[in-house]
Amino acid sequence: MNLFLLRAIMLIGLLQLANCHLRDRARAASDVEYHDDLQYAAHAGALLDLYTPRAAADATPAVIFIHGGYWRNQSRSYYRAFTGLYQNFGIALAKRGIATAVIDYRLHPQATLTDQLADVTAAASFMHENAARYKIDASQIFLAGHSAGGHLALMVLWGKGPTFIKGVTALSPILDIAHMRLSKDAEFNASLTTPFFGSGEADMLHSPATYLKPTSRPALLLYGEKDDDYLLQQQQKYQSAFAEKKLANAKFVTIPGADHTTMVMHVNTDKDNISDAIAAFVRTNTGEISHAK
């Protein structure tokens, strides 16, 4: 083996060991309690990491966070050693008094949209059924997600998902598959949109915007001021359309200065203007919760 390559591998290994040591020390001193690699369903890879407030006196609300990646990539620990994703959501919300599960789910092309919705539902059901074990209020369970994860969260909330789910915070969610198709190039649609969603009427059936009704449970939809163009177009279109129909249960908010990436990357940093919005949405729909940053 090339000597330079061998040294590089050894250095990476040492850095990983050091990172694990520092992580374990930080966890021991943290006001957040960590529950890693919890199996929420029988199939391989159905895992979540749960972050809970260590000093909570009472049962807390819970959020299940669903990562993005256009339904075909990323994970709950996506480049975590370098970016902190997506444990930053768990830590930030647990510090604000909200238990937070960050989940993996099956991905395209091995999985279908039906599989992914089933995984989100199974993770929510796991949290509901194990609420007492983790000091969670089973009546106060929410979903949150970014991009494709926001799409899945809204499909579960406004579709046929469990009635115990109280609401959703969706970051840069895709609301309209037909509009996404028109906004993307032929290669993207041939590799993802058509094989994953189908075409024609299927676009409407797989779009969260189709299902919002006056009786739907509430959702907070956050878009970055500098988000992807087609997402900002969807925000503008449906903010107007929902307002015309007096559908007040979907609230749109623009995050100043944020783009599609910083919507998640800035969480749990000094530039975080997402976590307080999620916590406020939860408080609005549950009553006050104690929190400390």
Image (cartoon, rainbow, N blue to C red):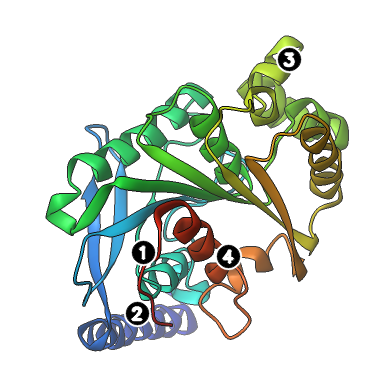
The quadrant of the image that shows the C terminus is bottom left
Q: Spatial distance from mark 3 to mark 4, Cα to Cα?
A: 35 Å
Which mark sits nearer the N-terminus, 3 or 4?
3
Q: From where the camera sits, is residue 108 visible?
A: no
| Residue 122, x across and y down, in percent | 32, 34
Mark 1 or mark 2, which has the lower sequence index? 2
Disc with the residue nearer the chain's start (2 vs 4): 2
Q: CA distance from mark 2 to mark 3?
A: 45 Å
Mark 2: give few (<14), some (14-19) or many (20+) Cα within 10 Å.
Answer: few
- Looking at the rendered structure, the secondary structure element under dot 2 is helix
List the residue tagged with mark 4: 277
Residue at x 25% of width, y 52% of height: 137
Q: Label 1's element?
A: loop
Answer with mark 1 or mark 4, whichever residue precedes in sequence: 1
**Quadrant housing residue 18:** bottom left
**Mark identifier at residue 199:** 3
Residue identifier under label 2: 16
The structure residue drawn at horizontal position 52% and vertical position 24%, both measured from the top left corner, is 159
Disc 1 + disc 4, Cβ < 8 Å: no
**In which quarter of the view is residue 254 placed?**
bottom right
Q: What whole-number distance in Å separates the C-alpha atoms at marks 1 and 4?
A: 13 Å
Secondary structure beneath label 4: helix
Check disc 3: other Cα within 10 Å, few if <14, some if 14-19, many if 20+: some
Q: What residue lies at 37% left-to-right and 33% top-to-bottom?
A: 121
The foreground one among 194 and 142 is 142
Q: Nearer the viewer, mark 1 or mark 3?
A: 1
Q: Amino acid at mark 2?
A: Gln
Type of amino acid at the residue the image marks with label 1: Ile
Residue bearing mark 1: 98
- 209 w.r.t. 204: above or below: below
Quarter of the image where the N terminus is located = bottom left
Q: Amino acid at mark 4?
A: Ala
